[in-house]
Amino acid sequence: MKKLIILILAVLVLGTIYVWLLPMVGIDTAINSNDPYKSVVLEREKNFGSRPVVPESPVVANADPDIENKSAPKTVQVATGQLVGVGTHKATGSVEVFGLGDQYGIKYADFSFESGPKLHVFLTNSLTINSTSVDLGPVSSTSGFAFYRVTPGVDVKKYKYIAVWSVDKKELYNYAEISNK
């Protein structure tokens, strides 16, 4: 019991010395805060005093005067579907297919399904995996949120289902019939 009290007192004393000495050696703990603006202001006050400092405006070389009229390419929702479990394999959630030009991504959102041996995500036109099916890779998560990139050049619009298939058991666990927009 005596050792515990001594240990607590030692921690309190060392903590107090640590907090008290940091500003004296020029380390301001507030600069390490998560607020980057506050960090910059504190650093400038330390270097220049507390007088207001106006930040320099950025110089943009060769600025395009019509920049406000141009926009970056946007992803477009191409298809959607609801997960359906197969047999004893329960599944809930939604699947969305997004496209940007000829590249696609598949997002599983707010979903849940049971795990299994060597589960992979496939694009397919039937509920069995065959030579025309496209393997998007192993399942990264069985709940929450997941994203799968589709191999460039593969046209998702040509497929009817997104399926989760056990490569080991050769068994369908769940699928979503995707309806093109």
Image (cartoon, rainbow, N blue to C red):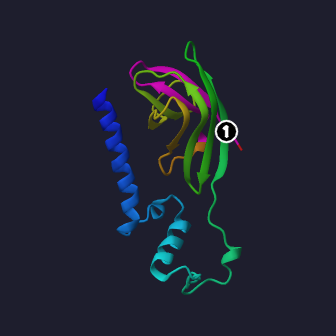
Examine the residues drawn in magenta and state their main secondary structure.
strand
**29, 178: nearer the viewer:** 29
> x and y percent of residue 49 in the render?
51, 81
**Which quadrant holds the N terminus?**
top left
Identify the residue at image location x=67%, y=38%: 80
Q: Is residue 47 visible?
A: yes
Residue farthest to the front?
A: 2
> Residue 138 appears at what percent x and percent y?
43, 34
Seen at 55% across and 24% down, the residue is 113
The type of residue carrying mark 1 is Thr
Residue 51: image x %, image y %? Answer: 57, 82
In this rendering, does residue 127 appear at all? Answer: no
Q: Is residue 74 above or below residue 5?
A: below
Q: Is residue 142 above or below residue 31?
A: above
- The foreground one among 116 and 121 is 116
Residue 175 magenta-highlighted? yes
Position of the C terminus, as image quadrant, is top right
Between 9 and 11, the residue placed more toward the observer is 9
Disc 1 element? strand
Q: In screen coordinates, is 116 left or right of 127?
A: left
Q: Is residue 142 left or right of residue 161?
A: left
Which residue is pictured at 58% across the width and 43% down the height?
A: 156
Mark 1, residue position:
80
Q: Give the percent coordinates (x, y) of residue 79.
A: 66, 42
Label 1 crowding class (10 Å Cα cut-off): few <14, some 14-19, many 20+? some
Residue at 46% from the left image edge and 76% from the top image edge: 46
* In the depicted structure, whether residue 99 falls above or below residue 7: below
Tell me if residue 104 is in the magenta stretch: no
Quadrant of the rendered image containing residue 107: top right
Range shown magenta: 158-180
